[in-house]
Image: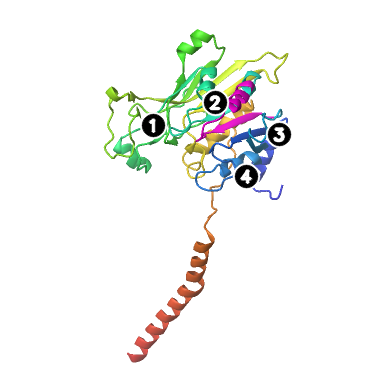
């Protein structure tokens, strides 16, 4: 360790408490969010936090390597914007059949080419955006867009049992268990809805850019509370599987984990819990690592030059000119 402050010691103990390094693979090549992107829509902050806790993060393109690495502990699909090839979907399906763990984040504007994956897992991923037009709530939370939905109802899941404040999900969609598929295909999954929006919300199937959004069931809108996070788990056969239990999480939003929103409310605590639960480190879910707020300022070189000119030349000259003018006035007086 490089220092002995509380944050460093806490994250070091978390890292040492794992029996091995956890290998997390982020799918790329279809417009997914990048774990190393430092822009506002990237995942670099949560990546840095996870790496300090003993996770190894890697981006993986199935076109370059036509398989998922054998040492993958968690596969992350972070809202792909372009359609996946049938061969790529087949690789992911085979990975799940072998007991692989998955974190699937699906934005409303993400590709719909993963329907075969949803059918395999017995879930429904809806098209539409969850909104909440409660003006008083928006003013209280400092939210200006009805599509930025707070969540305070977490159910009894071990993933969220320690969350005591709200999380924020901007531009999310509805995900839920497909009861018909479960009965028809006898899927052995246990389903747990652990994230739901407030009763005042609804799934908006129309445009969300208009200021006066209203609930219209005749157009397919669904009244809240709307489920937007579901966890799946099932027992595995030890004869040909790595672990005793397979775990999967599907959330109808990826913005909550992006750099621009990860610091809001309990978003970063939720993100940490997701990865700890998926890696079967349940005892670490109760431990909240001390995480400093992001204090980095990423600006382009032209803007940096303008700032330098202002603070090194314009501002000092302005102060000198002001002082000279004041001196002249006093002298004349």
The CA distance from mark 3 to mark 4 is 20 Å
Above or below: residue 56 compared with residue 241: below
Give the magenta part as a residue range: 72-94
The residue beneath circle 1 is 129
The structure residue drawn at horizontal position 37% and vertical position 88%, both measured from the top left corner, is: 328
Are the residues flagged by discs 4 and 1 in contact, CB closer than 8 Å? no
Is residue 109 shown left or right of residue 98? left
Measuring from the top left, give residue 277's x and y in whole percent.
59, 27
Neighbours of disc 1 within 10 Å: few (<14), some (14-19), many (20+)? many
Nearer to us: label 3 or label 4: 3
Q: Nearer the viewer, residue 230 or 284?
A: 230
Q: In the structure shown, which secondary structural element does the residue marked by tag 4 occupy?
A: helix
Q: Is residue 47 magenta?
A: no
Measuring from the top left, give residue 141's x and y in whole percent.
37, 41
The CA distance from mark 2 to mark 4 is 28 Å
The structure residue drawn at horizontal position 34% and vertical position 33%, both measured from the top left corner, is: 132
Hey, which residue is sitting farthest bottom in the picture?
A: 332
Q: In the structure shown, which secondary structural element does the residue marked by tag 3 occupy?
A: loop
The residue beneath circle 2 is 249
The CA distance from mark 4 to mark 1 is 37 Å
Q: Quadrant of residue 269?
A: top right
The residue beneath circle 4 is 7
Neighbours of disc 3 within 10 Å: few (<14), some (14-19), many (20+)? some
Neighbours of disc 2 within 10 Å: few (<14), some (14-19), many (20+)? many
Is residue 152 shown left or right of residue 77? left
Nearer to us: label 1 or label 2: 1
């Amino acid at each position: 360790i490089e220092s002995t402050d509380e944050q460093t010691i806490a994250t070091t103990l978390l890292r040492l408490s794992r029996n091995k390094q956890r290998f997390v693979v982020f799918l790329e090549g279809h417009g997914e969010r990048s774990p190393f992107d430092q822009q506002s829509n990237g995942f670099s902050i949560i990546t840095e936090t996870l790496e300090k806790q003993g996770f190894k993060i890697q981006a993986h393109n199935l076109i370059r390597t036509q398989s998922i690495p054998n040492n993958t502990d968690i596969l992350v699909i972070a809202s792909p914007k372009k359609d996946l090839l049938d061969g790529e979907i087949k690789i992911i399906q085979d990975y799940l059949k072998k007991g692989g763990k998955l974190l699937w984040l699906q934005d409303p504007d993400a590709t719909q080419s993963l329907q075969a994956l949803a059918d395999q897992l017995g879930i429904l991923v809806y098209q539409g955006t969850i909104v909440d037009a409660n003006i008083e709530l928006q003013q209280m939370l400092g939210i200006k867009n009805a599509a930025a939905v707070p969540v305070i109802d977490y159910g009894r899941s071990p993933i969220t049992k320690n969350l005591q404040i709200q999380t924020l999900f901007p531009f999310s969609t509805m995900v839920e268990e497909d009861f018909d598929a479960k009965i028809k295909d006898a899927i052995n999954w246990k389903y747990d809805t652990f994230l739901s929006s407030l009763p005042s919300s609804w799934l908006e199937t129309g445009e969300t850019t208009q200021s006066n959004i209203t609930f219209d069931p005749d157009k397919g809108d669904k009244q809240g509370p709307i489920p937007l996070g579901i966890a799946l788990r099932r027992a595995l056969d030890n004869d040909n599987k790595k672990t005793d239990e397979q775990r999967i999480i599907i959330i109808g939003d990826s913005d909550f984990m992006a750099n621009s929103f990860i610091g809001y409310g309990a978003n970063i605590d939720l993100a940490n819990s997701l990865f700890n639960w998926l890696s079967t480190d349940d005892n670490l879910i109760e431990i909240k690592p001390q995480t400093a707020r992001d204090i980095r300022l990423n600006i382009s070189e032209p803007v940096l030059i303008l700032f330098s000119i202002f603070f090194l030349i314009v501002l000092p000259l302005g102060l000198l000119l002001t002082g000279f003018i004041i001196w002249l006035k006093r002298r004349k007086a």
